[in-house]
Image (tube, helix red, strand yellow):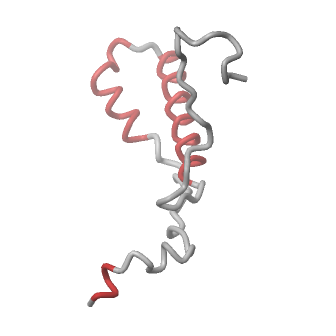
């Protein structure tokens, strides 16, 4: 039973996370669209409904691409945070 809590298990050995299904399916935007229509449907023109649906579908596609990126528990962010210091002089350590 000590192996269950062993931090040097599979993830530490570099096996990585399990793959996640990235196929949203053709109806992935329907629950969000139904919620919007239930709340605001009477105020939306057909053109506005079409644009709202396109926006939701774009968000679903973007989320699908984000989920497709395999990340491990110890993966660092892609960018580095560099805080701005108002009292720092120009050229004192900043690019």
Vertical arrangement, residue 7 with respect to residue 49, above or below = below
Total marks in image: 0
Nearer-the-camera pick, 24 or 44: 24
Q: Give the residue at x 52% y 35%.
A: 59
Q: Give the residue at x 52% y 9%.
A: 86
Nearer-the-camera pick, 27 or 46: 27
For this orientation, the residue located farthest to the bottom is: 1
Indicate left or right for 92 with 33 as reference.
Answer: right
Indicate left or right for 27 with 90 as reference.
Answer: left
Nearer-the-camera pick, 80 or 21: 80
Q: Quadrant of residue 31?
A: top left
Q: Quadrant of residue 9?
A: bottom left
Residue 68: x %, y % from top left: 59, 55
Q: Give the residue at x 71% y 15%.
A: 91
> In the rendered view of the protein, which quadrant contains the C terminus?
top right
Residue 87: x %, y % from top left: 52, 9
> In the rendered view of the protein, which quadrant contains the N terminus?
bottom left
Residue 22: x %, y % from top left: 55, 57
Residue 14: x %, y % from top left: 57, 73
Vertical arrangement, residue 74 with respect to residue 58, above or below = below
Q: Give the residue at x 31% y 79%.
A: 5
Indicate left or right for 62 with 45 as reference.
Answer: right
């Amino acid at each position: 039973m000590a192996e269950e809590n062993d931090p040097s298990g599979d993830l530490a050995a570099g096996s990585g996370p399990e793959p996640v299904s990235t196929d949203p399916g053709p109806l992935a935007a329907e629950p969000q669209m139904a919620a919007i229509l239930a709340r605001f449907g009477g105020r939306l023109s057909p053109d506005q409904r079409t644009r709202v649906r396109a926006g939701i579908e774009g968000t679903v596609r973007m989320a699908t691409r984000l989920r497709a990126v395999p990340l491990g528990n110890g993966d660092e962010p892609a960018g580095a945070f560099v805080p701005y210091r108002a009292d720092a002089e120009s050229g004192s350590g900043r690019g």
